[in-house]
Amino acid sequence: MATPRGEFSSRFGFLMAASGSAVGLGNIWGFPTNAASNGGAAFLFVYLLLAFALAYPALMAELIIGRNARANGITALRSIASGRKSRIAASLVGFSGIVTVSLILSFYAIVSGWMIAHFLDAVARMLEMQKVADWLTTDESTRNSIFVVLFMTMTVFIITAGVRNGIEKWASRLMPSLIAILILLIIYVITLPGAADGLRAYLVPDFSRITDPALLVDAMGQAFFSLSLGVGTMLIYGSYISKDENLPVTGSLVALLDIGIAVIAGLLILPAMYAALASGVEIFDLDGNLIAGPGLIVSVLPALFSTMGGIGLFVAFAFFLLMTIASLTSSISMLEVPVAYGVEHHGFKRKWAALGIGIVITIISLIIVFNFDPLFDMVVTFTTEVSQPLLGFAFCIFVAWIWRRNDILQEIKQGCPDVENGLFWKIWPFYVKFICPVAILTVYFQ
Ligand code: TRP
């Protein structure tokens, strides 16, 4: 406990860091394809509803627990527990969060590695290095391992520098660039032939799908993954917010940024897919569904870019740069969870904790790379569909049923003295107490 804790220097710094965590592959890749295969704007509609009604309250729960304890997940949950049993449960939930987020990072790093490889492919082709470009786009274990190691090295490098000089500094540089690149790409792609069909697929609702349980499950999973919930990521970022900050407002800005960028990303991905269709690229799989898995990003879109001639190189460059940035600002938030625990609980130096834990996660990633078919989907499903919702549920229980209501109020009042009279305090406690846990379990058992 000897090292002083970090703190974000400003609201802007926190917003960039937290929205950087939230905005990732889940927004730019997951959300648009989920929407396209689930009735377009009908999914969008359900998603917006769930994101504001369920994910935002859960996000607030994590931010408040974190800022109150100013500590890593395990210590923070234990600090609100009241008896021996709830303290044991706190350790268990905190620890499961650390394991889950480390596993999420281990598959995230593989996909992010593909993004760097495709980014460098565009560079190689600009330099007319065809052999290098071919190697970069061939999906095989050596290439994948090299880029996992590279991506994890970048993540460890940023985390080593700490909260202000690492996370905040890099997020504040990268997030504005991400938004700028995204908007430029949309402006270009929307003018392509066929793009309008993509907009239609995205924005015209097929309301017959709205009662489909699969749509609900997908929308909730998407919202939880996108807001980085359930595993202590937002808790740890919350623990670095200043006590003067207005939490309900800051939290809603993070949710708005995340949801906004997901919705905007849909304006890029779906028009791009239909533009690809218009230039002869197959965008449907054998069952007639839109290709949504890895094939979308690493084959459909590159095929589109290569039909564009010279400018396609720049579009590919910008697109994969966008994906790499989105991944990196998310991966640092994942690594911070176990690192903060190692530093605060075991007294490790930040540098050694980041390096040691980074190496362990890289090794797990490499095991997945070399056993891709049996392991990859299994790890994704277990962490995002089983573990994350259950832990999200547990966080709600801790805040609403175990933590004393008055203590919560005192915590939020710092930075938001009038909270008691506002809408937030009228609705939120009830929500996390009843609606969120019931909704999470209902959707989970679907
Ligand atoms: N939210 C990020 C995305 O949309 C990924 C992410 C970061 C995440 N931290 C997380 C997902 C913690 C689950 C848990 O890509």
Image (cartoon, rainbow, N blue to C red):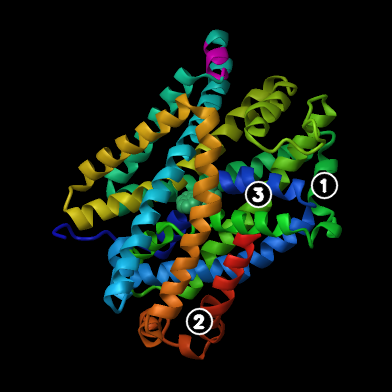
Question: Mark 3 sits on what residue?
Answer: 31
Mark 3 Cα shell of 10 Å, populated few (<14), some (14-19), many (≥20): many
Q: Nearer the viewer, residue 358 or 98?
A: 98
Position of 226 relative to 240 (above/below): above
Say whether residue 1 is left or right of residue 276. left
Q: At numbered mark 2, what does the secondary structure look like: helix, strand or loop?
A: helix
Q: Which quarter of the rendering shows the N terminus? A: bottom left
Residue at the top extreme, as displayed: 131
Q: Position of residue 356 (x, y in %)?
A: 25, 39
What residue is at 51 percent from the left and 23 percent from the top?
Answer: 120
Magenta-drawn stretch contains 60: no
Question: Mark 2 sits on what residue?
Answer: 429
Foreground tag (2 vs 1): 2
Mark 2 Cα shell of 10 Å, populated few (<14), some (14-19), many (≥20): many
Tag of residue 201? 1
Mark 1 Cα shell of 10 Å, populated few (<14), some (14-19), many (≥20): many
Image quadrant in which you'd find residue 435: bottom right
Looking at numbered disc 2 in the image, what kind of residue is underneath it? Answer: Pro
Distance between mark 3 and mark 1 Cα atoms: 14 Å
* Mark positioned earlier in the residue sequence (2 or 1): 1
Q: Nearer the viewer, residue 27 or 305?
A: 27
- The rendered magenta stretch, by its main secondary structure, is classed as helix
Looking at numbered disc 1 in the image, what kind of residue is underneath it? Answer: Ala
| Region rendered in magenta | 132-138
Image quadrant in which you'd find residue 406: bottom left
Q: Nearer the viewer, residue 391 or 68?
A: 391
Looking at numbered disc 3 in the image, what kind of residue is underneath it? Answer: Phe
Q: How many marks?
A: 3
* Mark positioned earlier in the residue sequence (3 or 1): 3
Q: At numbered mark 3, what does the secondary structure look like: helix, strand or loop?
A: helix
